[in-house]
């Protein structure tokens, strides 16, 4: 902290020395600004700084809009991808379930046919045994 105050003092002293040398070189001397001139200089400086700050806020606002746009787009793209994956998975699962149901039905039909054939054969065997006993 001490270094900065020394640096400021030496810089300020150099500026004062330059003004004094300039004033000595000019016949009219150092010009003292009136209060209205000082005020206009301060207002001009403030206007420049305010414009710089406004430009900075405009840039920040543009970046925020850009981030929201791409962030929103990314989120929508993510949900769209998720919806697509769910849809593809549902279609594949639906096909798989239909194939399983058809396989199960076919197996059930074959099992029923085998049972009915076995039942008919048992009935025939019983009828033959009864016919032989008579």
Image: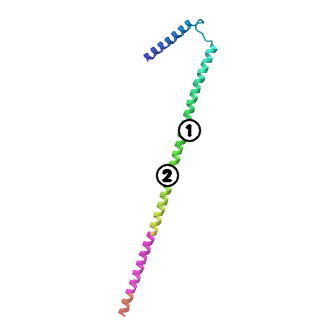
Q: Is residue 41 magenta?
A: no
Q: Give the residue drawn at x 49%, y 60%.
A: 91
> Label 2: which residue?
82
Q: In which quadrant is the C terminus drawn?
A: bottom left
Please rate how many residues cluster around mark 1, counting C-alpha atoms within 10 Å: few if below 14, some from 14 to 19, many from 20. Answer: few
User: Residue 65: which quarter of the image?
Assistant: top right
Using the image as rendered, state which of residue 13 and residue 2 is in the foreground.
Answer: 13
Q: What secondary structure is marked by label 2?
A: helix
3 vs 104: above or below: above
Whole-percent x and y of residue 115?
Answer: 41, 78
Q: Give the residue drawn at x 43%, y 16%.
A: 3
> Label 1: which residue?
65
Using the image as rendered, state which of residue 31 and residue 58 is in the foreground.
Answer: 31
Instruction: Looking at the image, tell me whether mark 1 or mark 2 is earlier in sequence order.
Output: 1
Q: Is residue 106 magenta?
A: yes
Tag of residue 19: none
8 vs 77: above or below: above
24 vs 4: above or below: above
Q: Does 78 sit left or right of 120 as displayed?
A: right
User: Residue 30: which quarter of the image?
Assistant: top right
Q: Main secondary structure of the magenta part?
A: helix
Q: What secondary structure is marked by label 1?
A: helix
Q: Mark 1 and mark 2 in contact? Answer it, CB < 8 Å.
A: no
Magenta segment boundaries in residue numbering: 103-125
Whole-percent x and y of residue 68?
Answer: 54, 40
Q: Does 33 sit left or right of 126 as displayed?
A: right
């Amino acid at each position: 902290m001490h270094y900065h105050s020394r640096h400021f003092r030496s810089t300020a002293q150099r500026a004062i020395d330059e003004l004094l040398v300039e004033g000595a070189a000019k016949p009219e001397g150092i010009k003292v600004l009136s209060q209205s001139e000082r005020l206009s200089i301060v207002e001009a400086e403030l206007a420049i700084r305010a414009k710089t700050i406004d430009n900075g806020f405009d840039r920040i606002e543009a970046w925020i809009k850009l981030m929201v746009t791409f962030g929103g787009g990314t989120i929508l793209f993510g949900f769209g991808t998720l919806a697509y994956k769910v849809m593809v998975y549902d279609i594949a699962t639906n096909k798989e379930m239909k194939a399983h149901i058809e396989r199960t039905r076919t197996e059930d039909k074959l099992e029923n046919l085998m049972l009915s054939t076995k039942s008919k054969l048992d009935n025939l065997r019983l009828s033959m045994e009864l016919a032989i006993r008579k």
